[in-house]
Image (tube, coloured by chain):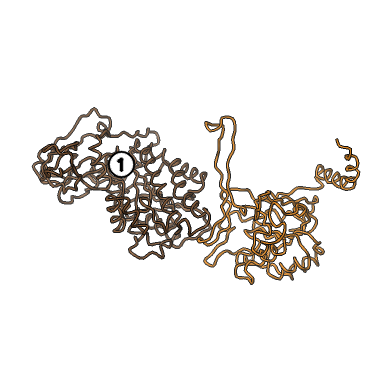
Chain colours: A brown, B orange
């Protein structure tokens, strides 16, 4: 029985805001494979290429045959809960504040026995469970055992809630809410239970179809914000930064140019100014205050989402300058992720393939609908994953990229 | 001092006396200085072209240091903007019709063109009624009947009170068919050039042409004919309501940008005290 999350009471302004703490974050290089998979929402364990043994914890060699040829393989996670422990005391500052904490011992059907965080919906041992990997507050992969069947208030389990960025009861900022994607993002946040969504908009004289209707929604508040202007970003952060729990950076300039198809650098500079420097300006102003609120109750600051592009991984020459600006943003987001980690704030990057918008008008389908991208971002928040590749195109290109970056480069530039 | 100095002083004697009287008038307040410029601010709107075209930068400003670790005892900024941002000057080279004229750019144009008499035609009532108001040659003739003929080599400024629209959306005044701001009609532009030999034309809105000027024949007639005839444009002017219909002198020097098409300016006007008889 999991108690449903209830809307947090208004914050008592006389009480000190609790400072963020992190669970232990040290990992061996081998163990980071678990984190890398969890960042994509996958549960993978090392499997020996010689004898097929699956092992945990991760090591440099196979525990059975000592082969060094180990591959990370996706796992179903099915297994048997052997026993459980309800931790009532801990010397670790992070867990001390979150006691009691349920731990379990699970023997996977594929062999290894694991110590796992235990979801409140799991029946007492012995019982069947499914182990999954999640990122914890320190951004490291950890194991969590779930019940096989959905239980009521599944997402509200306190241990799971620590590892996700559920928009419910939270306040979100969408940094450009005028575009079809921005509008879809605002609506998706509301559908996911966000209490308040700030719909940011620049250049008030430009009317965007649908924006007035968006502002009529009771959960939506407009906020002027131009990511190309430092003072505008500073003012918006001063005004609402202390209340933003989820920031979704949808601000983007996209022009369909390579190097030779457009003379001069002005359109490329406009892309960099929004896609790269815009992110930097937002991160400098909103980052510190969000980081300070990483443990501010059940509706703490929790996530920063960047809408990047699959072209951040490999350049698509017809949109070559756009690709470069997204690659720059990807690199900066990794810096942001490192700097937000002490606050337990998750930085999520979305890598969509072509979005079905005006700047991809001449590209053939399949193209990702803005609403589908918004939905994928919400799911990433709920799952607490770091890198989301929404849609078939993005997934396929990711697979190719992981197999061989050079292959993807050549395929995108025939 | 060179040997030529006394002779030079002698040659300057007559103008020196009028400048001396100007200095006295400025000191006494008999001549007032009016600021015709909007403040350069990131919030001031800039011209918008369809997104596939190149765009003029809006005004942007970034701190270099402010008595801090980036520079302990000093405050300063870097700013960026286009040649046509804020209150600005258009040189003939700005338009394709003026591209081959001599001395058509901000660094080569004759500086004596940058100080001159201004006639201010009050269209504020018409613009309030109709944002697409076009100033015609007929309107100009009526102005002359009341206030006297426009002298040769004068600036003609179109007062619309558009600069009083402090809300950027109202200032831009876009709808689904584009921008709606007042400007001159084709016959007014040709009249001013061919029959009055003006030095340039100025407005309070973004562009010397009307917001819907693209649909006139030819498109943007003020840009096309003024710059084609080597004349200048001033845009985003303010405080035209403080100028008399005749009798002001304006200063509107652009930055000396090499081969520049224009520049933001600090436009100033000299007016006789109590000289404004508008409104």
Q: Secondary structure at mark 1?
A: loop
Q: Nearer the viewer, residue B134 or A154?
A: B134
The answer to whether residue A294 shows anywhere in this view is yes
| Residue occupying image coordinates x 56% and y 52% | B57
The answer to whether residue A103 shows anywhere in this view is no
Q: Position of residue A254 (x, y in %)?
A: 44, 56
Horizontally, residue B101 falls left or right of residue B81, namely right
Horizontally, residue A360 falls left or right of residue A404, namely right
Q: Position of residue B267 (x, y in %)?
A: 70, 51
Q: How many marks?
A: 1
Horizontally, residue B212 falls left or right of residue A341, namely right
Label 1 crowd bin: few (<14), some (14–19), many (20+), radius 10 Å: many
**Residue identifier under label 1:** A298
Chain of the residue that carries numbered disc 1 in the rendered image: A
Q: Position of residue B36 (x, y in %)?
A: 70, 51
Q: Residue furthest top?
A: A91
Q: Nearer the viewer, residue A313 or A135?
A: A313
Q: Position of residue B202 (x, y in %)?
A: 70, 59
Q: For the N terminus of chain B, which image quadrant?
A: top right
Q: Quadrant of residue A158?
A: top left
Q: Quadrant of residue A109?
A: top left
Figure check: A231 above or below B235: above
| Residue occupying image coordinates x 20% and y 50% | A152
Q: For the C terminus of chain B, which image quadrant?
A: bottom right
């Amino acid at each position: 029985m999991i108690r449903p999350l209830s809307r947090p009471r208004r914050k008592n302004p006389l009480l000190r805001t609790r400072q963020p703490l992190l669970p232990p974050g040290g990992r061996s290089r081998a163990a980071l494979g678990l984190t890398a998979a969890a960042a994509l929402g996958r549960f993978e364990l090392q499997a020996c290429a010689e004898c097929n043994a699956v092992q945990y914890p991760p090591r440099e060699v196979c525990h059975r045959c000592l082969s060094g040829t180990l591959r990370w393989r996706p796992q179903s996670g099915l297994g048997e809960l052997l026993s459980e422990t309800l931790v009532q005391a801990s010397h670790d500052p992070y867990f001390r504040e979150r006691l009691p904490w349920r731990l379990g011992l699970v023997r996977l059907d594929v062999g290894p026995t694991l110590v796992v965080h235990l979801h409140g919906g799991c029946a007492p041992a012995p019982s069947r469970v499914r182990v999954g990997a999640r990122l914890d507050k320190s951004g490291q992969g950890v194991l969590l055992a779930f019940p096989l069947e959905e239980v009521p208030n599944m997402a509200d389990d306190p241990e799971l809630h620590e590892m996700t960025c559920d928009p419910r009861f939270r306040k979100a900022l969408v940094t450009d809410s005028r575009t079809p994607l921005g509008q879809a993002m605002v609506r998706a946040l509301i559908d996911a239970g966000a209490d308040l969504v700030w719909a940011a908009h620049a250049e008030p004289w430009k009317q965007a179809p649908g924006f007035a209707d968006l502002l009529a929604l009771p959960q939506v508040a407009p906020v002027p914000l131009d990511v190309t202007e430092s003072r505008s970003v500073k003012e918006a952060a001063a005004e609402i930064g202390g209340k933003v729990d989820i920031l979704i950076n949808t601000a983007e300039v996209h022009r369909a140019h390579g190097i030779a198809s457009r003379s001069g650098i002005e359109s490329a500079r406009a892309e960099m100014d929004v896609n790269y420097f815009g992110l930097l300006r937002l991160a400098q102003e909103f980052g510190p205050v969000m980081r300070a609120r990483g443990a501010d109750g059940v509706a703490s600051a929790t996530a920063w989402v960047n809408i990047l592009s699959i072209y951040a991984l490999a350049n698509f020459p017809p949109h070559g300058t756009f690709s470069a600006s997204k690659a720059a943003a990807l690199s900066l987001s990794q810096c942001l992720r490192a700097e937000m980690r002490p606050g337990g704030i998750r930085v999520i990057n979305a890598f969509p393939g072509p979005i079905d918008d005006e700047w991809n008008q001449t590209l053939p389908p399949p193209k990702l609908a803005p609403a589908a991208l918004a939905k994928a971002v919400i799911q990433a928040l709920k799952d607490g994953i770091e890198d989301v590749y929404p849609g078939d195109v993005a997934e396929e290109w990711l697979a190719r990229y992981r197999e061989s970056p050079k292959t993807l480069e050549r395929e995108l530039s025939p | 001092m060179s040997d030529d100095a006394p002779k030079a002083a002698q040659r300057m004697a007559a103008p020196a006396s009028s400048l001396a009287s100007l200095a006295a008038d400025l000191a006494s307040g008999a001549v007032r200085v009016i600021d015709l410029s909007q403040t350069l601010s990131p919030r001031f709107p800039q011209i918008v072209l369809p997104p596939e075209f190149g765009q003029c930068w809006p005004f942007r400003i970034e701190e270099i240091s402010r008595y801090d670790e980036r520079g302990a005892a000093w405050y300063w900024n870097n700013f960026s903007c286009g040649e046509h941002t804020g209150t600005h000057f258009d040189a003939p080279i700005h338009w394709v019709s003026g591209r081959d004229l001599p001395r058509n750019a901000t660094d080569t144009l004759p500086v004596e063109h940058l100080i001159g008499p201004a006639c201010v035609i009050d269209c504020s009532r018409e613009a309030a009624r109709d944002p697409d108001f076009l100033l015609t040659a007929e309107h100009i003739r009526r102005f002359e009947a009341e206030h006297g003929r426009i002298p040769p080599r004068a600036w003609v400024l179109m007062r619309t009170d558009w600069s009083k629209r402090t809300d950027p959306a109202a200032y831009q005044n876009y709808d689904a068919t584009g921008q709606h701001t007042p400007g001159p009609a084709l016959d007014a532009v040709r009249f001013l050039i061919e029959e009055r030999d003006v030095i340039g034309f100025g407005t309070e809105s973004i562009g010397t042409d009307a917001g819907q000027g693209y649909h006139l024949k030819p498109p943007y007639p003020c840009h096309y004919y003024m710059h084609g005839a080597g004349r200048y444009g001033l845009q985003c002017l303010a405080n035209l309501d403080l100028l008399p219909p005749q009798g002001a002198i304006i200063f509107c020097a652009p930055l000396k940008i090499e081969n520049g098409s224009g520049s933001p300016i600090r436009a100033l006007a000299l007016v006789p005290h109590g000289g404004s008889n508008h409104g």
